[in-house]
Amino acid sequence: MRGTGVEALAIAARAGGELLFDGVTFTAGPGECVVLTGRNGSGKSTLLGCLYGTHEVSAGIVRVGGMTPDERKVGFRRQVSAVLDDSALFDDLTARQHLDLLLRSFPAVDGRGVAKWLVEAGLDERADVPAIGLSAGQRRRLLLIGAVARHHDVLLLDEPERALDTAGREWLTGLIAADLRRGAAVVVASHHRRLAERVGATEVDLG
Ligand SMILES: Nc1ncnc2c1ncn2[C@@H]1O[C@H](COP(=O)(O)OP(=O)(O)OP(=O)(O)O)[C@@H](O)[C@H]1O
């Protein structure tokens, strides 16, 4: 495990001319999880953007994997895996092709190959369907399994429970718990009320 997980010290962020949050402080070290909660519009996605380098903090200090967040830098992307929206899939590529491409671009998190990750995600029977032909929940499963299958020290997830059914939410909880056991630092924005307690996370409520 390189870097130091996620550190946010007295951070503030604005969007659309409005101050969304101010003085937010938390850390997630290796094997630790922070769950960001709060009403719609409280700034959870914006905060995750601050951790990934797609949104600038207006005050405070953010370090992710020991670096100032910048998703344009390869060194940063090698350490930080993120699922922040649904746009990261190619419509014409199948689930198998997506994972194959990913594991050619980044080292795998352990010795498991694409076939085993497909089974783990419950996508083995849909492995050769182009992503455009997958259901919303299946697309989400593909994004999530891709994020944990590639090597990373830090995992950032924005409402990962979106589109998942009851079994899918259970699966997600296990996926995050396994990632924490592997030593990742995890920050999740979520409306899934029981997630924090299920994975032993610290909750940071944006109000
Ligand atoms: N690029 C932007 N320009 C203007 N306003 C923005 C921008 N990005 C976010 N906002 C505003 O900032 C506020 C916080 O948005 P954000 O998506 O961070 O909230 P959230 O807590 O993730 O909400 P939700 O629970 O609905 O996903 C919202 O009022 C949103 O309209």
Image (spheres, rainbow, N blue to C red):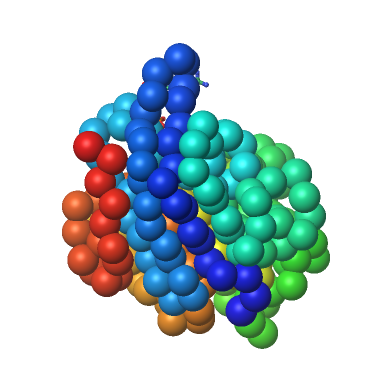
Q: Is residue 161 left or right of residue 109?
A: left
Q: Position of residue 178 (x, y in %)?
A: 43, 77
In the image, 21 versus 54, the foreground residue is 21
Q: Is residue 117 left or right of residue 202?
A: right
Residue 76 vertical placement versus 116 (above, below): above
Q: Is residue 73 left or right of residue 53?
A: right
Q: Is residue 19 visible?
A: yes
In the image, 165 versus 33, the foreground residue is 33
User: Residue lying farthest top?
Assistant: 17
Callout count: 0
Name the quadrant containing residue 79. Answer: bottom right
Taking the spot 30% from the left edge, 66% from the top edge, the residue there is 201
Q: Quarter of the picture for ligand 1?
A: top left
The quarter of the picture where the N terminus appears is: bottom right
The quarter of the picture where the C terminus appears is: top left
Taking the spot 49% from the left edge, 37% from the top edge, the residue there is 59
Taking the spot 32% from the left edge, 27% from the top edge, the residue there is 41
Taking the spot 35% from the left edge, 34% from the top edge, the residue there is 21
User: Residue lying farthest bottom?
Assistant: 111
Q: Position of residue 184 (x, y in %)?
A: 51, 72
In the image, 150 versus 166, the foreground residue is 150
Q: Is residue 179 visible?
A: no
Residue 2 vertical placement versus 160 (above, below): below
Residue 181 vertical placement versus 12 (above, below): below
In the image, 70 versus 85, the foreground residue is 70
Name the quadrant containing residue 150. Answer: bottom right
Name the quadrant containing residue 80. Answer: bottom right
Q: Position of residue 45 (x, y in %)?
A: 43, 37
